[in-house]
Image (tube, rainbow, N blue to C red):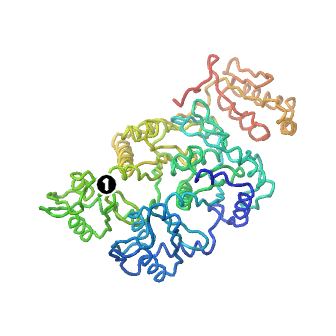
Amino acid sequence: MSRQLVRTTCASMICCMMLCAISLAEDASTPSPETPWELKIENILDQKLTESMDFVETPLSDVIHVLSENYHVPILLDHRGLDELGISGDTPVTVHVSDISLRTALRLMLHELELTYVLKDEVLLITIPEMAEEELITRVYPVGDLVKVYPWQKSNVSAKPELSVPVIGPPQPEGPSSNGPISNQVLGQFVEGIGNVGHERLLSSQGGVRSNGLDTVIELIVMVIAPNTWDEVGGPGSIGALTPDLMIVKQTRDIHAECAALLSMLRQIPPVHEQELGKVYSFDQQGTAEERRIKQVLEERVTLEFVETPLTAVIDQIEQKHNIKIQIDQMGLEELAISADALVTCKFEKMTLRTALRWILRDFELRFIIKDEILYITTPDASAEALTTISYPVGDLIGRKYADDGSIVELDFDSIIQAVMIIQPESWRYLGGWGAIVPFRQRGLLVAYQTQEVHEQIVDLIAQMRAAREKTGYKPSIVQPDPSEVVVRRYHWPECEEKDHEKISQFPPRDAIEPVIRKIVDQSAGQNPDVKDSYIVFLPDRIVVRDRRDVQARIQQFLDELGGPDISQSSDVTDGKLRGGGGMF
């Protein structure tokens, strides 16, 4: 059913799109806003519990009534959906939580019943996960600041091509700005393309980065945010380009939150060409404040000793002593036939709490993850499925190749990606897992979708790389050309296809361009008499020049400033072969 709903009628999509267009915020860094009733419920869910949530074998309907009354939130049960699981308002609920948000408390309580909730028609609806997946929301994200393609991005080669990205509707070469209204024509073209969702724009066979900056952002999102939920792999969600700087996403509320968080993280780091060489950039905040605090607590050195102590008592002591919230996945333990009162005997001295807790849980084949505001003890399978997205600024660790004019031509992400993927190789998508690591070249970032355990190892690996650099003085490869070196360069002329005639007609004719380029070369010959055999050849589809690099840079700048068709996609030639065609170094 959920997949069918992705292919909604054109009429309903037009309504959704118009609502998004009307509500588009003036701030180009945020998606279209939520309605007042959604914001109200979301704010209440984020508030801490006003009192402990203690229920023992209490009917679900009674629990919902108490929460609705105490927090002034309209909460309803989806009786039709619950009937499919044999659950009713009389189903008993046992839960004991405090000092956490209402959102987390609800999720913990509903998890034990294999239920979830959605916001729908001004109420908080308790329902089944399958129904929640069908409650998709369409939002427009202005991403103009993230989709600008710099010259050095056009020739980059990614580590490996992964997932192709469908473009919803026909590509729009021109359209409204992210701050302006969305025209009905654009909306109509978008809806018209809904039937062509299966059409794809593929990466090149070498894995080259697309020239369309928005495609790069879309590819990043579908690979590192809930990758099994997008329509191209059979999921319900969809994503595409509405205009060159507007991205449209149809997804669940939680996945929209992840998309917004990722885009916000990307914006915290300056474009790589503006980054100071060798400087370590970092995020002020990544994850919630409570998640960061729990991670800090886990790094504290502790001394623990237990003799024939029930696991629940051990967890209670650790929770109280270190002031963190810990919950046990009761349903998961039941699946493994493990009792929460199983006895623990251990002794650890001056060990990090993280390591000690892992040793305690290892005897029961259990794991822990940090989830929302709590440390959650669960099964290995559940732990392996709890993948999260984290961005890593690595601009200080990647090699760079510069052009004649001082701009960056290429970035070497391959070396660091290969090093990272040595960590638990079977967990990466290439070998059957769901893990992915994607470079966001514009900001010098690696974005990884992985388990918390693998993320910890990535953090450690990057720290080791930086420590080694400080200790040995090692620096990434920085290739800066000698301006006096003589090279042969080809400047490609646009193909005279019918669709380009109008654009080409606006460009200066070749007989006006040739004298300028000849003059640049002639001036160089007068200034640099030691350069022998320099030449310039005008061919039907390209211009070939042999001269110094600084002269080539002047020609490149001249062609770039002309605008019009992109005839400045140049390439160096040595002994009749392209230089650098197969990789960076």
Residue 213, quarter of picture: top right
Which one is in front, 317 or 13? Answer: 13
Q: Residues within 10 Å of mark 1 (few under 14, many from 20)?
A: few
> Taking 88 as reference, is 137 above or below it?
above
> Taking 323 as reference, is 166 above or below it?
above
In this rendering, would 537 be left or right of 292? right
Q: Residue at x 58, y 36 (%)?
A: 156
Which one is in front, 203 or 533? Answer: 203
Residue 406 locus on image (x, y percent): 61, 39
Is residue 329 visible to us here? no
Q: Residue at x 46, y 45 (%)?
A: 396
Is residue 235 visible to us here? yes
* Helix, strand or loop under label 1: helix
Residue 582, quarter of picture: top right
Residue 137 locus on image (x, y percent): 62, 61
Query: Hey, what amino acid is under mark 1?
Result: Glu
In this rendering, would 174 be left or right of 229? right
In this rendering, would 323 be left or right of 555? left
Question: Which residue is label 1 attached to?
Answer: 335
Q: Residue at x 18, y 64 (%)?
A: 310
